[in-house]
Image (spheres, helix red, strand yellow):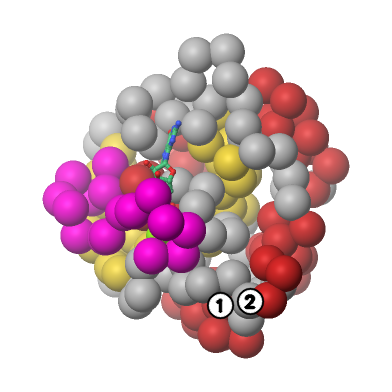
Amino acid sequence: MSFTLAIIGRPNVGKSTLFNRLVGQKLALVDDAPGVTRDRREGEGRLGDLSFTLIDTAGLDEGPKGSLTARMQEQTETAIELADALLFVIDARAGLTPNDRAFADFARRANKPVVLVANKSEGKHGEIGAMESYALGLGDPVQISAEHGEGMGELYDALRPLL
Ligand code: GDP
Ligand code: MG
């Protein structure tokens, strides 16, 4: 059985973009509209000499006033159950939102290794969000840009000891 990593986090932080970068095929739908991915996607991910099964959790629509829908919670919980470790993704440009904190609670309760990923950190952007993310209690953020492929060496270093 291949080591399974689940990418979790609120809609629009770049989970599917990261999935596509690691799986190397456009298996997950990416769109500018938040919550466009409808289903859980799985693929074989690679990073350097590491290979793993990768799960992309669907965004689905945020509920009224940006609340978490029951379905979003279910999807995340299922992915967490299936996973050996979690990639918890935040949008470093947006900073932390209440939904980030709610997803972080799921991640913490899972009692599985969590790699905190501060996405959209290309250039000098994202420093503030990365600093804020220390407050989640999920360890040091790995600053990446899924879109531009930055920080993949740091992500490798964070994943290597887990696999
Ligand atoms: P998901 O809902 O978490 O799966 O997020 P998506 O992967 O669908 O991405 C949401 C939006 O963020 C899209 O417009 C992406 O192009 C954009 N995005 C993803 N990664 C990055 C990144 O590294 N930098 C920037 N600036 N935008 C990104
Ligand atoms: Mg998505």
- Above or below, 104 against 20 in this view is below
- Above or below, 17 against 9 in this view is above
Please tell me whether residue 35 belongs to the stretch shown in magenta. yes
Mark 2 vs mark 1, foreground winner is 2
55 left or right, relative to 43: right
Classify residue 107 by image quadrant.
bottom right
**Residue 63: mark in rendering:** 2
Q: Which residues are magenta?
A: 19-36
Q: Residue at x 79, y 35 (%)?
A: 132
**Residue 72: mark in rendering:** 1
Q: Is mark 1 within 8 Å of ligand 1?
A: no
Q: Residue at x 75, y 65 (%)?
A: 102
Residue nearer the viewer, 43 or 71: 71
Residue 163 location in percent, x, y? 42, 50
Disc 1 packing (10 Å; few <14; some 14–19; many ≥20): many
Q: Quadrant of ligand 2?
A: bottom left
Residue 148 location in percent, x, y? 34, 26
Contact between marks 2 and 1 (CB within 8 A): the answer is yes
Residue at the outermost top position: 124
* Residue 76 visible in the picture: no
Residue at the outermost right position: 135
Q: Residue at x 62, y 63 (%)?
A: 112
Dominant secondary structure of the residues highlighted in magenta in the image: loop
Kind of residue at disc 1: Met
Please tell me whether residue 56 belongs to the stretch shown in magenta. no
Disc 2 packing (10 Å; few <14; some 14–19; many ≥20): few
Residue nearer the viewer, 94 or 142: 94
Residue 152 location in percent, x, y? 39, 28
Q: Circle 2 — which element?
A: loop
53 left or right, relative to 160: left
Q: Circle 1 — which element?
A: helix
Quarter of the image containing the N terminus? bottom left
